[in-house]
Image (cartoon, helix red, strand yellow):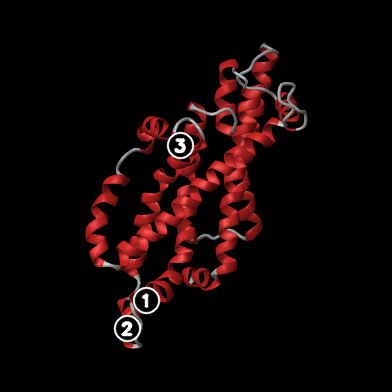
Amino acid sequence: MKRLINLRPTAPFNLMLGLLPFMLLIIAYMAGSDARLELNPNDKLLPGLEQMGGAIERMALEPSKRTGDYILWTDTASSLTRLGLGVLIAASLGLLLGLLTGALPLVSSTFSPLLTVVSLIPPLALLPILFIVFGLGELSKVMLIAIGITPFIARDLQRRTVEIPSEQIVKAQTLGANTSQILMRVLLPQLMPRLIDAVRLSLGAGWLFLIAAEAIAATDGLGYRIFLVRRYMSMDVILPYTAWITLLAFLFDALLAWSSRRLFPWHVQGAQS
């Protein structure tokens, strides 16, 4: 008799098991929605699929009467621009700090304590300061994302740099490599796939900071729209927008994973072995 810990589902059964919780959630939601709408056809708490479909059509396929924009796509473009810039800045700074503090003891002694302290500061507590310093425009929102996830990326890459076998550095020095050559040709290539992994792990926090910043001070964006319509209890808009954000996050993560496999196949093979 096989123990439960040793059972491995086949590929089709594995897919079915993965889809099962989603199907149960959808069924439970539809049952609850039907029950509430039967009692009150104007209920807003659990809108039906028809109501949400109408809201999606209105937000995505019909131009706004006030601006002429297709609201869903305008909000999506604004949010992705802010998130992309913030993540790009964080990845660049995190890579630089992680590489230097992990490889150079003098730099580590100087900046590692500061990096540790900054990583302990709740980024959302800095939001009022960012609004005061950078204003209510795009820069403050991008900076919140960058400040929020840079310490995580930097500390992760610092640890990865320290884990690289010292024999590689010794061999490079034996062959005449100087410090910059060791950094660029020995350490950096091994950190690039780790950087993608760190960015993937930090995306959840990046989305959180983006939504928070847009909810407080913005005139467009996915987070702005959700908090704008909540005053009207427009769950038929909030739920599709939340699902859309989840889908975008999944696609962003899948794109990074695909890029890692394409650019650094040796890293994926090493992780699986």
| Secondary structure found at label 1 | helix
Residue tagged by mark 1? Answer: 182
In the rendered image, the vertical position of residue 7 relative to residue 62, given as above or below: below
Give amino acid for label 1. Ile
Q: Is residue 137 left or right of residue 36?
A: left
Give amino acid for label 3. Ser
**Which of the pair 57/42 is nearer the observer?**
57
**Which of the pair 45/99 is nearer the observer?**
99
Residue 172 location, x and y as percent? 35, 83
Disc 2 and disc 3 in contact, CB within 8 angstroms: no
Q: Residue furthest right?
A: 62
Residue at 48% in and 41% down: 142
Q: Residue furthest bottom?
A: 175
Distance of label 1 from label 3 (alpha carbons) = 36 Å
Residue 122 location, x and y as percent? 34, 38
Give amino acid for label 2. Gln
In the rendered image, the vertical position of residue 253 relative to residue 194, given as above or below: above
Q: Is residue 139 left or right of residue 248?
A: left
Q: Quadrant of residue 229?
A: top right
In the rendered image, the vertical position of residue 150 relative to residue 22, given as above or below: below
Residue at 59% in and 43% down: 80
How many tags in the picture? Answer: 3
Q: Label 2 neighbourhood size at 10 Å, few (<14), some (14-19), many (20+)?
A: some
Distance of label 1 from label 2 (alpha carbons) = 8 Å
Q: Label 3 neighbourhood size at 10 Å, few (<14), some (14-19), many (20+)?
A: many
Residue at 26% in and 56% down: 112
Residue tagged by mark 3? Answer: 140
- Say which mark, if any, is on residue 125: none
Distance of label 2 from label 3 (alpha carbons) = 44 Å
| Secondary structure found at label 2 | helix
